[in-house]
Amino acid sequence: MANQATITAVRARSFTVPTDAPEADGTFVWEKTTIVVVHVEAAGQIGLGYSYTDASVAGLIGETLASVLEGGDVFDIPRLNAALWGAVRNLGRSGLAASAISALDTALWDLKARLLDLPLARLFGLARDTAEIYGSGGFTSYDDRQLSAQLAGWVEREGCRAVKMKIGSEPERDPARMAVAKHAIGEAALFIDANGAFTPKRACAFAQAAAAFDVAWFEEPVTSDDPVGLAMVRSRAPVGMEIAAGEYVYTPDDMRGLLAAGAVDVAQADVTRCGGYSGFRTIAALCEAAHVDLSGHCAPALHLPVAVAVPRFRHLEWFHDHVRIERMLFDGAPVARDGFIGPDLSRPGNGLTFKHQDAEAYAV
């Protein structure tokens, strides 16, 4: 079995896709998104993984990390992961290195499932049949018409029971924008995301103002690099408003710090940043031990197999940019029904197939 599962090739390429309109949040402006796609080959099968990150990650994989995996046994993913993390010790584990390892880890798990002719969700073991989604976008660069149409569309078309909008670029405008959002979504819950735009005291004041619009979730009111500040906001938030953070968790230590500080009501993790499926499952165990729910950040197609497998899972972010890109570049991307997505258990692995020809126009 070991000889049959020897990794013979590792390939990574970068693709940059323009947004369909200018986008901004409380701390950043962008007009394109880059995805690094990884293929790992063994015994005649190919595993697929990816990360939304910088194009340079493809070079890091090709020049440094591919050789760490080649010749290894894909069934020994913990051993391979240890070697990958060891290889980036002097580079710094967080950031680009973690994104590279995340893409490779998701490809390894996909490959293992394909070699076993199993859907990856079955290999992990199902805890539920589907994962709830919430619509996410509502960029601060949108005018009221764009904001209203996008948020209402997720409720009416995908059946989302909650939607999220960006705030913080111009905080003085945000109460009017939240009023527009509430009118558009009816009975659905409203989430807001500041992307770390505020100081703790300003975030506390904003949370009180947001309560008038029944905001149920306030994401990154301050940077997640400040767990004490997050904990302060959480302690002073209105009843019924949950504080969430964790999208920039790269290692289990990062999540342990947030949980130890009592910084969040709901933790977030991103399988394209936190060490792939292996890292996400470790973080899920930390959250279970801390009695804190876990939510998946972005990349819904890639998250889906593990989202239906881990305990205390709340929901997945149906992020506008990533849903659009995953539909463009992958066959098998999930389709939302009544606010949920589920894995196709008739397809092995993560159920995704990369559209090489369609992607070529976006190659870096």
Image (tube, rainbow, N blue to C red):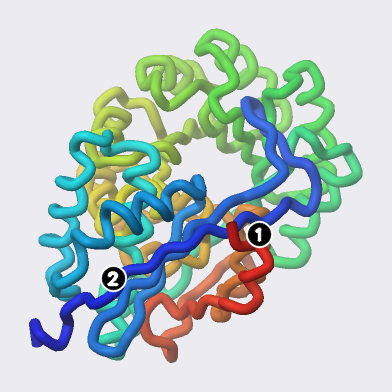
Q: Residues within 10 Å of mark 2 (few under 14, many from 20)?
A: many
Residue 194 coordinates in the image, percent (x, y): 60, 28
Q: Earlier in the sequence, mark 2 or mark 1?
A: 2
Q: Quadrant of the C terminus?
A: bottom right
Foreground residue, 133 or 302? 302
Residue located farthest toward the top when viewing the structure as drawn:
201
Q: Residues within 10 Å of mark 1 (few under 14, many from 20)?
A: many
The spot of residue 202 in percent (x, y) is 59, 11
At horizontal 53% and vertical 52% (from top left) the residue drawn is 298
Q: Which residue type does callout 1 highlight?
A: Cys
Horizontal placement of 296 versus 24: left or right? left
- Callout 2, which amino acid? Trp
Identify the image quadrant of the N terminus: bottom left
In the displayed orientation, state which residue is furthest to the right.
Answer: 145
The residue where tag 1 is placed is 160
Residue 294 seen in this snapshot = no
